[in-house]
Amino acid sequence: MSLVGWIIIFILVIPIIGVLLWMLLAASFVRVPSGSIGLVMIKGKATDKALPPGPHFVPALRRHMIEEYPSVELAYRAGGPEDPGKPEFNQSGPPLQVTLGDRTTAVISLTVRFRLIPEQLKLVHERFGPKGIFGIVRDETSRAVISTLGAHETHIDNLFLAADYVRTFTDLATMEAANEAARRAVNGILEHSGSDAAPCRLWDLHEPELLEPWRANDRVRYRQGLPWDDTGVRLGLSALAALYRGASALEASIVNVVSSAMHVEDLLSYIRTGESRSELVQRLTSGPGAPSGELLRAFAALAGTAASPAESAATSALEALASAERDSPNAGPPGVTTGNVRFVEP
């Protein structure tokens, strides 16, 4: 084959090979969305490889696909109101009707929350598939509840209520009320079973006395069949807002007065030691003529002069040291060390 033929082949073949490689690489990059687990499927069969959320490289040498399963918490609700959430995460069904051991019929509402285990995702896919997860949870939950409550030793006397079905000191639909109801139910179980375990502690809900007028107004309107009136609440919120604005203005005034009457460093020094910085310097420099006093006065001038250059302030300190050395009666010749300070003639 001539050179021209080879050139034509290279011109045609190399771009084709490049396009095929690009398509192969593009097909090998997969992305699992947030909140999902990706199960790698090879030729329609599940593998043991589960991919967490994010980008992944799966060689596309064999035909593969990614089956997505939710990785977040799922919930199945038997009875109760319909859940407005996403159906792939939350599903509901009818309540369970159970015949107890004493032939009493009970209607039970419950919620089952669960997560899929990535290591067992292949088994879940082969036995139930993406559409059969909630079905198996519903069936297994019904079977477990009916077999447990239908036992001969299970009677209506063993039923203890909690949550919103009982009256509590915490007269609000809150987690505190649910906690109190659960503690009361536990105490009933302990008493009924004759257990010697310590019962749960109970206490009244603390209600601030400041809100008693609003509570009294609510009680009166409730007895009269009137709707809730938020006028008092709005007035109270307005009063609190006005009080907050007044406190903020008072605080700003105090800060202005203090800052104008005393330097900030003096105030901080007074808070720490009970003596302001200026008083401390005055006390330490009370002995005029002493070298330490002259030095402290020089450095006091350095600290009090915020806008002065550091060099001029340092020069003042050195001049004070030299002046103290010259005025000292026991001063030696230039270059003699007195204590830990070496005095040098400028």
Image (tube, rainbow, N blue to C red):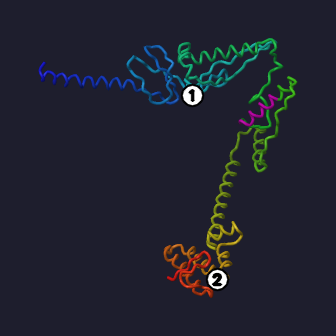
Secondary structure of the residue carrying tag 1 is: loop
Q: Nearer the viewer, residue 83 or 10?
A: 10
**Going 67% across and 77% down the picture, which residue do you hit?**
284
10 Å crowding of disc 2: few (<14), some (14-19), many (20+):
some
Residue interval drawn in magenta: 174-186
* Residue 257 located left or right of residue 61: right
Q: Nearer the viewer, residue 158 or 283?
A: 283
**Going 51% across and 27% down the picture, which residue do you hit?**
52
Give the main secondary structure, helix, strand or loop, of the magenta stretch: helix
Q: Mark number for residue 220?
A: none
**Going 53% across and 29% down the picture, which residue do you hit?**
35
How far apart marks 2 and 1 lie (CA) works out to: 78 Å
Q: Mark number for residue 72?
A: 1
The kind of residue on which mark 1 rests is Val
Residue 77 percent coordinates (x, y): 64, 23
Secondary structure of the residue carrying tag 2 is: loop
10 Å crowding of disc 1: few (<14), some (14-19), many (20+):
some
Residue 275 percent coordinates (x, y): 70, 72
Q: Nearer the viewer, residue 191 or 290?
A: 290
**Which callout, 2 or 1, points to the residue nearer the camera?**
2
Quarter of the image with the N terminus in it: top left
Q: Mark number for residue 290?
A: 2
